[in-house]
Amino acid sequence: MNKDTVMIERWLTEINTLPGVETVFIASGRGSVLYNAGKLKLSSKELEDIALRVLRIGALFNEKDENVSEIELFWKNVFIISKISNNILLTTICQNPKILPLLRITLNVSLSHLLQEKKIIKQAKNHATDKTLVLRKGKFDEDELSLLSSI
Amino acid sequence: MALIGNLKDIKLPSLIQLNCMERNNAKLTIERSGKFGFIYFEGGQVTHAEFEPYLGEEAVFKLLSLPEARFKVESDVKPPVRTIQTNWSNLLLDGLNKLDHSQDEAENQYYRLFERLMTIKGAVSVSLISEDGHLIDQGQHPDSVKKDPNAAFIMLQAKKMAKTLDLDNPEFVSIFSGQQRYIIILFHQHYILMQMDKKVKSEVVMPLIKQAIGKK
Protein backbone atom coordinates (compact mmCIF):
# COMPACT_ATOMS: atom_id res chain seq x y z
CA MET A 1 0.00 0.00 0.00
CA ASN A 2 1.58 3.33 -0.97
CA LYS A 3 1.76 6.42 1.24
CA ASP A 4 -1.17 8.16 -0.50
CA THR A 5 -3.51 5.22 0.03
CA VAL A 6 -2.47 4.98 3.68
CA MET A 7 -3.34 8.65 4.19
CA ILE A 8 -6.68 8.29 2.41
CA GLU A 9 -7.57 5.28 4.56
CA ARG A 10 -6.47 7.18 7.66
CA TRP A 11 -8.96 9.96 6.92
CA LEU A 12 -11.73 7.47 6.26
CA THR A 13 -10.94 5.70 9.55
CA GLU A 14 -11.05 9.09 11.29
CA ILE A 15 -14.66 9.47 10.14
CA ASN A 16 -15.53 5.83 10.66
CA THR A 17 -14.51 5.77 14.31
CA LEU A 18 -17.13 8.37 15.25
CA PRO A 19 -19.86 6.58 17.23
CA GLY A 20 -22.86 5.78 15.01
CA VAL A 21 -21.05 6.08 11.67
CA GLU A 22 -21.94 2.92 9.76
CA THR A 23 -20.13 3.52 6.52
CA VAL A 24 -18.13 6.13 4.67
CA PHE A 25 -17.19 6.24 1.02
CA ILE A 26 -15.55 8.43 -1.57
CA ALA A 27 -17.06 8.56 -5.05
CA SER A 28 -16.06 10.35 -8.23
CA GLY A 29 -18.21 12.90 -10.03
CA ARG A 30 -19.47 10.08 -12.22
CA GLY A 31 -20.61 8.00 -9.24
CA SER A 32 -17.82 5.42 -9.19
CA VAL A 33 -16.92 4.41 -5.65
CA LEU A 34 -13.18 4.94 -5.20
CA TYR A 35 -12.78 4.03 -1.52
CA ASN A 36 -15.06 2.81 1.19
CA ALA A 37 -14.87 1.68 4.78
CA GLY A 38 -17.40 0.73 7.41
CA LYS A 39 -19.50 -1.86 9.16
CA LEU A 40 -22.54 -1.64 6.90
CA LYS A 41 -22.64 -4.51 4.43
CA LEU A 42 -23.51 -2.70 1.21
CA SER A 43 -22.34 -3.96 -2.16
CA SER A 44 -20.36 -1.63 -4.40
CA LYS A 45 -23.42 -1.55 -6.68
CA GLU A 46 -25.58 -0.30 -3.79
CA LEU A 47 -22.98 2.29 -2.79
CA GLU A 48 -22.77 3.47 -6.40
CA ASP A 49 -26.54 3.73 -6.55
CA ILE A 50 -26.50 6.00 -3.49
CA ALA A 51 -23.59 8.05 -4.87
CA LEU A 52 -25.30 8.51 -8.23
CA ARG A 53 -28.57 9.65 -6.67
CA VAL A 54 -26.78 12.16 -4.42
CA LEU A 55 -24.86 13.45 -7.46
CA ARG A 56 -28.12 13.77 -9.42
CA ILE A 57 -29.55 15.96 -6.66
CA GLY A 58 -26.44 18.15 -6.81
CA ALA A 59 -26.58 18.26 -10.61
CA LEU A 60 -30.08 19.79 -10.52
CA PHE A 61 -28.54 22.84 -8.87
CA ASN A 62 -25.55 22.83 -11.24
CA GLU A 63 -28.09 23.10 -14.07
CA LYS A 64 -29.15 26.38 -12.49
CA ASP A 65 -25.55 27.54 -11.96
CA GLU A 66 -25.64 26.88 -8.25
CA ASN A 67 -22.92 24.76 -6.66
CA VAL A 68 -24.03 22.35 -3.98
CA SER A 69 -21.54 21.57 -1.22
CA GLU A 70 -23.71 19.58 1.17
CA ILE A 71 -26.62 17.15 0.73
CA GLU A 72 -28.21 15.53 3.76
CA LEU A 73 -31.05 13.04 4.01
CA PHE A 74 -32.81 12.41 7.29
CA TRP A 75 -34.80 9.45 8.47
CA LYS A 76 -35.82 8.97 12.11
CA ASN A 77 -32.65 7.08 13.04
CA VAL A 78 -30.58 7.05 9.87
CA PHE A 79 -28.79 9.98 8.24
CA ILE A 80 -26.92 10.26 4.97
CA ILE A 81 -24.49 13.16 5.13
CA SER A 82 -22.68 14.05 1.89
CA LYS A 83 -20.11 16.66 1.01
CA ILE A 84 -19.23 17.53 -2.58
CA SER A 85 -16.12 19.38 -3.70
CA ASN A 86 -13.84 19.34 -6.76
CA ASN A 87 -15.52 16.36 -8.44
CA ILE A 88 -15.29 14.29 -5.25
CA LEU A 89 -18.24 13.09 -3.19
CA LEU A 90 -17.65 12.09 0.43
CA THR A 91 -20.66 10.32 1.94
CA THR A 92 -21.42 8.78 5.30
CA ILE A 93 -24.35 6.79 6.61
CA CYS A 94 -24.80 7.46 10.31
CA GLN A 95 -27.24 6.25 12.96
CA ASN A 96 -26.50 8.65 15.79
CA PRO A 97 -28.17 12.10 15.61
CA LYS A 98 -26.06 13.40 18.51
CA ILE A 99 -22.81 13.28 16.57
CA LEU A 100 -24.09 15.05 13.42
CA PRO A 101 -22.48 18.44 14.22
CA LEU A 102 -19.14 16.73 14.94
CA LEU A 103 -19.53 14.50 11.90
CA ARG A 104 -20.01 17.55 9.63
CA ILE A 105 -16.86 19.19 10.98
CA THR A 106 -14.90 15.94 10.61
CA LEU A 107 -16.16 15.55 7.04
CA ASN A 108 -15.14 19.11 6.14
CA VAL A 109 -11.66 18.66 7.60
CA SER A 110 -11.23 15.19 6.07
CA LEU A 111 -12.43 16.32 2.65
CA SER A 112 -10.05 19.27 2.57
CA HIS A 113 -7.16 16.91 3.44
CA LEU A 114 -8.32 14.25 0.99
CA LEU A 115 -8.37 16.82 -1.79
CA GLN A 116 -4.69 17.42 -1.19
CA GLU A 117 -3.80 13.76 -1.72
CA LYS A 118 -2.16 13.31 -5.12
CA LYS A 119 -3.93 10.01 -5.72
CA ILE A 120 -7.34 11.57 -5.12
CA ILE A 121 -6.48 14.59 -7.29
CA LYS A 122 -5.45 12.23 -10.10
CA GLN A 123 -8.56 10.07 -9.75
CA ALA A 124 -10.82 13.12 -9.65
CA LYS A 125 -9.12 14.40 -12.79
CA ASN A 126 -9.50 11.04 -14.57
CA HIS A 127 -13.18 10.93 -13.69
CA ALA A 128 -13.78 14.62 -14.39
CA THR A 129 -16.99 15.19 -16.28
CA ASP A 130 -19.71 17.72 -16.89
CA LYS A 131 -21.44 17.82 -13.48
CA THR A 132 -24.87 17.63 -15.09
CA LEU A 133 -24.05 14.52 -17.12
CA VAL A 134 -25.55 12.32 -14.37
CA LEU A 135 -28.94 13.83 -15.28
CA ARG A 136 -28.63 12.79 -18.90
CA LYS A 137 -26.81 9.45 -18.75
CA GLY A 138 -27.77 6.37 -16.81
CA LYS A 139 -30.91 4.44 -16.04
CA PHE A 140 -34.05 6.42 -15.31
CA ASP A 141 -37.56 5.13 -14.77
CA GLU A 142 -40.67 6.76 -16.22
CA ASP A 143 -41.31 8.96 -13.14
CA GLU A 144 -37.74 10.24 -13.15
CA LEU A 145 -37.84 10.99 -16.88
CA SER A 146 -41.13 12.82 -16.55
CA LEU A 147 -39.82 14.98 -13.67
CA LEU A 148 -36.55 15.65 -15.51
CA SER A 149 -38.41 16.78 -18.61
CA SER A 150 -39.72 19.74 -16.60
CA ILE A 151 -36.20 21.17 -16.02
CA MET B 1 -82.74 5.32 -23.85
CA ALA B 2 -80.42 6.36 -21.03
CA LEU B 3 -78.14 9.38 -21.28
CA ILE B 4 -74.58 8.40 -20.34
CA GLY B 5 -71.53 10.62 -19.85
CA ASN B 6 -68.92 12.04 -17.50
CA LEU B 7 -69.21 15.02 -15.15
CA LYS B 8 -65.98 16.43 -16.52
CA ASP B 9 -67.86 17.04 -19.80
CA ILE B 10 -71.29 18.06 -18.46
CA LYS B 11 -71.24 19.57 -14.99
CA LEU B 12 -73.69 18.31 -12.39
CA PRO B 13 -75.41 21.73 -11.95
CA SER B 14 -76.17 21.71 -15.71
CA LEU B 15 -77.58 18.17 -15.50
CA ILE B 16 -79.82 19.13 -12.56
CA GLN B 17 -80.96 22.31 -14.29
CA LEU B 18 -81.72 20.45 -17.52
CA ASN B 19 -83.77 17.72 -15.85
CA CYS B 20 -85.73 20.18 -13.72
CA MET B 21 -86.47 22.63 -16.53
CA GLU B 22 -87.53 19.79 -18.81
CA ARG B 23 -89.73 18.51 -15.94
CA ASN B 24 -88.25 15.05 -16.37
CA ASN B 25 -89.16 12.15 -14.13
CA ALA B 26 -85.75 10.50 -13.96
CA LYS B 27 -83.03 8.89 -11.93
CA LEU B 28 -79.49 10.20 -12.24
CA THR B 29 -76.85 7.65 -11.20
CA ILE B 30 -73.33 8.92 -10.52
CA GLU B 31 -70.41 6.55 -10.10
CA ARG B 32 -66.90 7.39 -8.96
CA SER B 33 -64.32 4.77 -7.95
CA GLY B 34 -66.99 2.16 -7.34
CA LYS B 35 -69.06 4.47 -5.10
CA PHE B 36 -72.59 5.27 -6.31
CA GLY B 37 -74.79 8.32 -5.80
CA PHE B 38 -78.37 8.88 -6.98
CA ILE B 39 -80.48 11.98 -7.66
CA TYR B 40 -84.20 11.63 -8.49
CA PHE B 41 -86.20 14.21 -10.45
CA GLU B 42 -90.00 14.45 -10.38
CA GLY B 43 -92.26 17.10 -11.86
CA GLY B 44 -89.49 19.67 -12.33
CA GLN B 45 -87.97 19.27 -8.85
CA VAL B 46 -85.18 17.30 -7.20
CA THR B 47 -87.07 15.06 -4.78
CA HIS B 48 -84.55 12.61 -3.43
CA ALA B 49 -80.77 11.99 -3.35
CA GLU B 50 -78.47 9.39 -1.88
CA PHE B 51 -74.69 9.31 -1.63
CA GLU B 52 -73.62 7.00 1.11
CA PRO B 53 -73.70 7.87 4.00
CA TYR B 54 -75.63 11.02 3.04
CA LEU B 55 -79.32 11.41 2.16
CA GLY B 56 -81.35 14.31 0.78
CA GLU B 57 -79.80 17.77 0.36
CA GLU B 58 -76.50 16.75 1.99
CA ALA B 59 -76.09 14.00 -0.62
CA VAL B 60 -76.61 16.55 -3.44
CA PHE B 61 -74.01 18.88 -1.86
CA LYS B 62 -71.47 16.05 -1.65
CA LEU B 63 -72.15 14.98 -5.24
CA LEU B 64 -71.62 18.58 -6.43
CA SER B 65 -68.05 18.44 -5.12
CA LEU B 66 -67.05 15.56 -7.43
CA PRO B 67 -64.77 16.92 -10.16
CA GLU B 68 -65.32 13.93 -12.41
CA ALA B 69 -67.48 10.85 -12.29
CA ARG B 70 -69.48 8.74 -14.72
CA PHE B 71 -73.20 9.35 -14.87
CA LYS B 72 -76.33 7.81 -16.34
CA VAL B 73 -79.80 9.38 -16.59
CA GLU B 74 -82.73 6.94 -16.82
CA SER B 75 -86.21 8.27 -17.61
CA ASP B 76 -89.45 7.36 -15.86
CA VAL B 77 -87.85 6.05 -12.66
CA LYS B 78 -89.70 7.01 -9.46
CA PRO B 79 -87.86 7.89 -6.20
CA PRO B 80 -88.18 5.32 -3.37
CA VAL B 81 -88.85 8.15 -0.91
CA ARG B 82 -88.99 11.98 -0.85
CA THR B 83 -86.16 13.53 1.16
CA ILE B 84 -85.85 16.96 -0.53
CA GLN B 85 -88.49 19.70 -0.32
CA THR B 86 -86.32 22.68 -1.33
CA ASN B 87 -86.89 24.23 -4.75
CA TRP B 88 -84.25 22.97 -7.19
CA SER B 89 -82.76 26.41 -7.91
CA ASN B 90 -82.36 27.20 -4.19
CA LEU B 91 -80.88 23.74 -3.65
CA LEU B 92 -78.35 24.34 -6.42
CA LEU B 93 -77.45 27.81 -5.11
CA ASP B 94 -76.93 26.46 -1.59
CA GLY B 95 -74.79 23.62 -2.89
CA LEU B 96 -72.60 25.88 -5.01
CA ASN B 97 -72.16 28.33 -2.11
CA LYS B 98 -71.07 25.48 0.14
CA LEU B 99 -68.66 24.29 -2.54
CA ASP B 100 -67.10 27.77 -2.87
CA HIS B 101 -66.79 27.98 0.89
CA SER B 102 -65.03 24.62 1.19
CA GLN B 103 -62.61 25.59 -1.61
CA ASP B 104 -61.86 28.84 0.24
CA GLU B 105 -61.20 26.81 3.38
CA ALA B 106 -58.72 24.57 1.53
CA GLU B 107 -56.91 27.65 0.23
CA ASN B 108 -56.91 29.19 3.70
CA GLN B 109 -55.50 25.97 5.10
CA TYR B 110 -52.37 26.42 2.92
CA TYR B 111 -52.31 30.13 3.67
CA ARG B 112 -52.19 29.42 7.40
CA LEU B 113 -49.59 26.69 6.90
CA PHE B 114 -47.38 29.05 4.88
CA GLU B 115 -47.91 31.78 7.44
CA ARG B 116 -46.69 29.46 10.23
CA LEU B 117 -43.68 28.29 8.19
CA MET B 118 -42.71 31.80 7.16
CA THR B 119 -42.49 32.90 10.81
CA ILE B 120 -39.50 30.54 11.23
CA LYS B 121 -36.32 32.58 11.42
CA GLY B 122 -34.40 32.43 8.15
CA ALA B 123 -37.36 31.31 5.98
CA VAL B 124 -37.22 32.93 2.54
CA SER B 125 -39.97 31.08 0.70
CA VAL B 126 -42.29 28.09 1.05
CA SER B 127 -43.73 26.08 -1.81
CA LEU B 128 -46.15 23.20 -1.81
CA ILE B 129 -45.32 20.81 -4.65
CA SER B 130 -47.18 17.74 -5.84
CA GLU B 131 -45.50 14.36 -6.29
CA ASP B 132 -45.56 14.89 -10.05
CA GLY B 133 -43.69 18.16 -9.68
CA HIS B 134 -46.50 20.71 -10.02
CA LEU B 135 -46.46 23.82 -7.89
CA ILE B 136 -49.67 23.80 -5.83
CA ASP B 137 -49.15 27.02 -3.90
CA GLN B 138 -46.36 29.30 -2.77
CA GLY B 139 -45.67 31.83 -0.06
CA GLN B 140 -42.61 34.05 0.13
CA HIS B 141 -41.12 37.31 1.23
CA PRO B 142 -41.45 39.95 -1.51
CA ASP B 143 -38.62 39.91 -4.11
CA SER B 144 -37.51 36.44 -3.11
CA VAL B 145 -39.27 34.31 -5.70
CA LYS B 146 -36.96 31.48 -6.78
CA LYS B 147 -37.66 28.61 -9.09
CA ASP B 148 -38.25 25.17 -7.66
CA PRO B 149 -34.98 23.21 -8.06
CA ASN B 150 -37.20 20.17 -8.81
CA ALA B 151 -38.12 19.11 -5.28
CA ALA B 152 -40.20 16.20 -6.59
CA PHE B 153 -37.17 14.73 -8.41
CA ILE B 154 -34.99 15.24 -5.33
CA MET B 155 -37.50 13.42 -3.11
CA LEU B 156 -37.86 10.66 -5.68
CA GLN B 157 -34.07 10.12 -5.57
CA ALA B 158 -34.24 10.13 -1.76
CA LYS B 159 -37.05 7.55 -1.81
CA LYS B 160 -35.02 5.35 -4.14
CA MET B 161 -32.03 5.58 -1.79
CA ALA B 162 -34.37 4.55 1.04
CA LYS B 163 -35.33 1.49 -0.98
CA THR B 164 -31.65 0.56 -1.45
CA LEU B 165 -31.12 0.87 2.30
CA ASP B 166 -34.41 -0.91 3.11
CA LEU B 167 -35.79 2.16 4.90
CA ASP B 168 -39.13 4.00 4.88
CA ASN B 169 -39.44 7.27 2.99
CA PRO B 170 -37.04 9.94 4.32
CA GLU B 171 -38.39 12.62 6.65
CA PHE B 172 -36.59 15.43 4.91
CA VAL B 173 -33.72 16.41 2.66
CA SER B 174 -31.45 19.39 3.30
CA ILE B 175 -29.25 20.88 0.59
CA PHE B 176 -26.72 23.66 1.03
CA SER B 177 -25.72 25.55 -2.06
CA GLY B 178 -23.46 28.20 -0.55
CA GLN B 179 -26.06 30.86 -1.28
CA GLN B 180 -29.04 29.23 0.33
CA ARG B 181 -30.26 26.18 2.22
CA TYR B 182 -33.13 24.19 0.75
CA ILE B 183 -35.21 21.89 2.93
CA ILE B 184 -37.72 19.48 1.42
CA ILE B 185 -40.23 17.73 3.66
CA LEU B 186 -42.85 15.10 2.93
CA PHE B 187 -46.28 16.55 3.62
CA HIS B 188 -49.12 14.06 3.11
CA GLN B 189 -48.96 13.23 -0.61
CA HIS B 190 -47.07 16.46 -1.39
CA TYR B 191 -43.71 18.05 -0.68
CA ILE B 192 -42.97 21.28 1.11
CA LEU B 193 -39.92 23.07 -0.25
CA MET B 194 -38.46 25.72 2.02
CA GLN B 195 -35.74 28.08 0.94
CA MET B 196 -33.86 29.29 3.98
CA ASP B 197 -31.11 31.75 4.71
CA LYS B 198 -27.64 30.19 4.29
CA LYS B 199 -26.89 30.63 8.01
CA VAL B 200 -29.77 28.33 9.00
CA LYS B 201 -28.79 24.97 10.50
CA SER B 202 -31.10 22.13 9.49
CA GLU B 203 -31.28 20.51 12.93
CA VAL B 204 -32.23 23.84 14.47
CA VAL B 205 -35.11 24.57 12.08
CA MET B 206 -36.39 21.03 11.58
CA PRO B 207 -38.16 20.77 14.96
CA LEU B 208 -39.80 24.15 14.23
CA ILE B 209 -40.86 23.06 10.73
CA LYS B 210 -42.24 19.78 12.10
CA GLN B 211 -44.21 21.71 14.71
CA ALA B 212 -45.58 24.10 12.07
CA ILE B 213 -46.81 21.30 9.83
CA GLY B 214 -48.13 19.25 12.74
CA LYS B 215 -45.63 16.40 12.47
CA LYS B 216 -44.22 14.66 15.55
Image: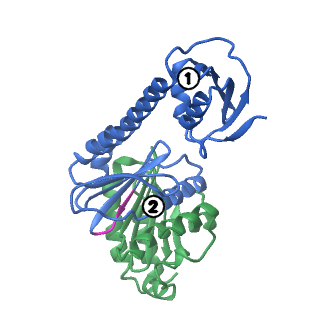
Q: Chain B's shade in the image?
A: blue
Q: Are marks 2 and 1 on the same chain?
A: no
Task: Specify start and end residues of the magenta stretch as a single range.
Answer: B174-178
Q: Nearer the viewer, mark 2 or mark 1?
A: 1
The percent coordinates of residue A136 (x first, y second) are 56, 77
The percent coordinates of residue A44 (x first, y second) are 61, 67
The crowding category of the residue bearing disc 1, from other C-alpha atoms within 10 Å (few below 14, some 14 to 19, many at least 20), is many
**In which quadrant will I find the C terminus of chain B?**
top left
Secondary structure found at label 2: strand
Dot 1 amino acid type? Ala
Tally of marks:
2
Is-magenta flag for residue B177? yes
Task: Tell me the chief SS of the magenta region.
Answer: strand
Q: Nearer the viewer, residue A27 or B74?
A: B74
The crowding category of the residue bearing disc 2, from other C-alpha atoms within 10 Å (few below 14, some 14 to 19, many at least 20), is many
Judge from the rendering whether residue B120 lies leftward or rightward of residue A74; answer left or right: left
The percent coordinates of residue A117 (x first, y second) are 40, 83
The percent coordinates of residue A57 (x first, y second) are 46, 66
Q: Are marks 2 and 1 in contact (CB under 8 Å)?
A: no
Dot 2 amino acid type? Thr
- Identify the residue under disc 2: A92
**Residue A39 in sight from this viewpoint:** no
Judge from the rendering whether residue B198 lies leftward or rightward of residue A31; answer left or right: left
Q: Nearer the viewer, residue B165 or B15?
A: B15
- Identify the residue under disc 1: B59
Q: CA distance from mark 2 to mark 1?
A: 55 Å
> Judging from the image, what is the letter of the chain drawn in green?
A
**In which quadrant will I find the N terminus of chain B?**
top right
Circle 2 marks a residue in which chain?
A
Question: Vertically, is B54 above or below A116?
Answer: above
Say which residue appears at 56% left-offset and 30% top-offset: B63
Secondary structure found at label 1: helix
